[in-house]
Amino acid sequence: MSLHPPLTRTPHRTPPALTALDEIALPLARAHELCGPARHMLALVLAGAASGPVIWIQPAWAPGRLYPDTLAERIAPGRLILVTPKRAEDLLWSMEEALRAGVVPLVVAELPEPPPLTPVRRLHLAAEAGAATGHGLPLGLILTPGPGGAAGVETRWHMAPRHAPGRSEWRLERRCARHAPPAAWQLRETGGQLALSRAAMG
């Protein structure tokens, strides 16, 4: 007779995630990267899928600002808290502190370049600390130019426009993720409504 209890397998649990358009899923209490020329559009789509206020951190020296009409199409403007640090080092610091507080479900930070591994790890730890406060599970989105490349992010998403006359379309790619394979979608807007369909990678 065995003196040890039988081994039992712990069922795999899908971590809680922010889900948009049924197929875009970003695990909560983590930091994710959005890159590509349509990264702001993707961030607004995700903000629209979240509930509660959104802290949006944008450099004070950034040449562009969120277009009010586009913003209003995705989320109620009253949900947006805009933070505009004057120093580059305050962008990630502001995001870290907002995530650690745990009182806002979504924190977005526009960065001039992808951050290295250590600051990203600090964002993950801050989000986990925010979740431990019991107010909710905060999610962090870092917006980086070009193809991105932030080290250690939970997921990386790239979105670029594929518009044609009379048609608004984007190509969305999940380029890396800890628990999901690379994938691609076509995002199309018709009559003010967004629809997502699978596309081939490559």
Image (cartoon, rainbow, N blue to C red):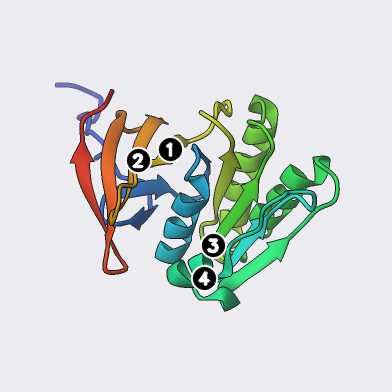
Identify the residue shown where x is 51% and y is 57%. 137
Residue 157's tag is 1
Q: CA distance from mark 3 to mark 4?
A: 23 Å
Q: CA distance from mark 3 to mark 2?
A: 23 Å
Image location of residue 7, percent across then percent down: 22, 29
Question: Is label 2 or label 4 in front?
Answer: 4
- Badge 2, how many Cα within 10 Å: few under 14, some, many 20+? many
* Residues marked 3 and 2 touching at CB (< 8 Å): no
Label 4 belongs to which residue? Answer: 69
Q: Amino acid at mark 4?
A: Asp
Which callout, 1 or 3, points at the residue further toward the start of the chain?
Answer: 3
Q: CA distance from mark 2 to mark 4?
A: 22 Å
Q: Residues within 10 Å of mark 1 (few under 14, many from 20)?
A: many
Q: Which residue is mark 3?
A: 105
Identify the residue position indicated by label 2 in the image: 172
Residue 144 locus on image (x, y percent): 59, 37
Q: Quadrant of residue 194?
A: bottom left
Residue 63 in percent (x, y) is at 72, 49
The residue sitting at 53% across, 33% down in the picture is 153
Q: Secondary structure at mark 1?
A: strand
* Closer-to-camera residue (39/141): 39
Dot 4 falls on a residue whose secondary structure is helix
Q: Nearer the viewer, mark 3 or mark 4?
A: 4
In the picture, the quarter occupied by the C terminus is top left
Rounded to the nearest angstrom, the CA distance separating label 1 from label 4 is 24 Å
Tell me the SS state at disc 3.
loop
Mark with earlier residue (1, 4)? 4
Mark 1 or 4: in front is 4
Q: Are marks 1 and 2 in contact (CB under 8 Å)?
A: yes
Distance between the alpha carbons at the discs numbered 1 and 3:
19 Å
